[in-house]
Image (cartoon, rainbow, N blue to C red):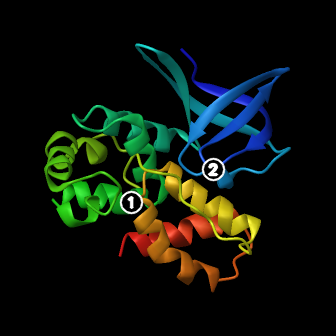
Amino acid sequence: MFEYLNGLITAITPSYIVVDVKGVGYKVQVANPYRYEENQEARVYVEQIVRDNEQSLYGFYDLNEKNIFLHLISVSGIGPKSALAILAGQDLQGLIHAIENDDVKFLTKFPKIGKKTAQQIILDLSGKFTAEGQMTLGEAPVEFSSGLSQELEDGLAALESLGYSSKEISKVKSTLEKEHLKSADEYLRAGLKLLSK
């Protein structure tokens, strides 16, 4: 129904952004909300997904990211939240390379993606990206200790919203605390890199 929204980013949370389009605020779930800035004018590509008891908008930085998301959710066992978690790493070339080269290990690094689901992703999507040309490129809430910077807290909350467990996040938290990064986006990216090792 919607292709994209052009508007003002009025709110950023660990799992979604709000895009104000001429006075209407659209709640858009995105892989990495910290790629955006509050009060920034932006074009957000979207996909509306309607389920039995909910309607949700999922947002993407560009059309390439949206197309990969649509392919991922076509795979049995991959829902929108899992697809966003896969996209959050922003290593789309690495993802495509893993699919084309039967790299199950790379795919199982993402939250809630087991060996069987990884093999299904490879089976269903192998060959589709290169053929299309443009694509060659839970649990209890995590308890954050006081004293963490707001940027680190936001980054950890974003990891949780992508489906990583409290235990997984706790393992990387102390390393991230030593990083002294400047933004939630940087903490999220660093956390994803640590969790994928």
- Identify which amino acid the numbered label 2 is placed on: Pro
Q: Nearer the viewer, mark 2 or mark 1?
A: 2
Point out the residue furthest to the bottom here.
178
Q: Position of residue 72 (x, y in %)?
A: 32, 39
The one of 137 and 171 positioned closer to us in this rendering: 171
Q: Are marks 2 and 1 in contact (CB under 8 Å)?
A: no
Tag 1 residue: 93
Name the residue: 55% across, 66% down: 189
Q: Residue at x 67, y 54 (%)?
A: 34
In this rendered view, identify the residue nearer to me: 171 or 37: 171
Location of residue 158 in the rendering, given as x and y in whole percent from the top left corner: 57, 55
Residue marked by disc 2: 14
Judge from the rendering whether residue 164 lies leftward or rightward of residue 28; answer left or right: left
Q: In the rendered image of this protein, does residue 85 appear above or below residue 97?
A: above
> Crowding at label 1, few (<14), some or many (≥20) Cα neighbours within 10 Å?
few
Q: Amino acid at mark 1?
A: Gln
For the point 25% across and 41% down, which residue is it? Answer: 128
Q: Quadrant of residue 165?
A: bottom left
- Counting residues from the start of the chain, the first of labels 2 and 1 encountered is 2
Residue 1 visible to an observer of this rendering: yes
Look at the numbered disc 1 and give the secondary structure of its residue: helix
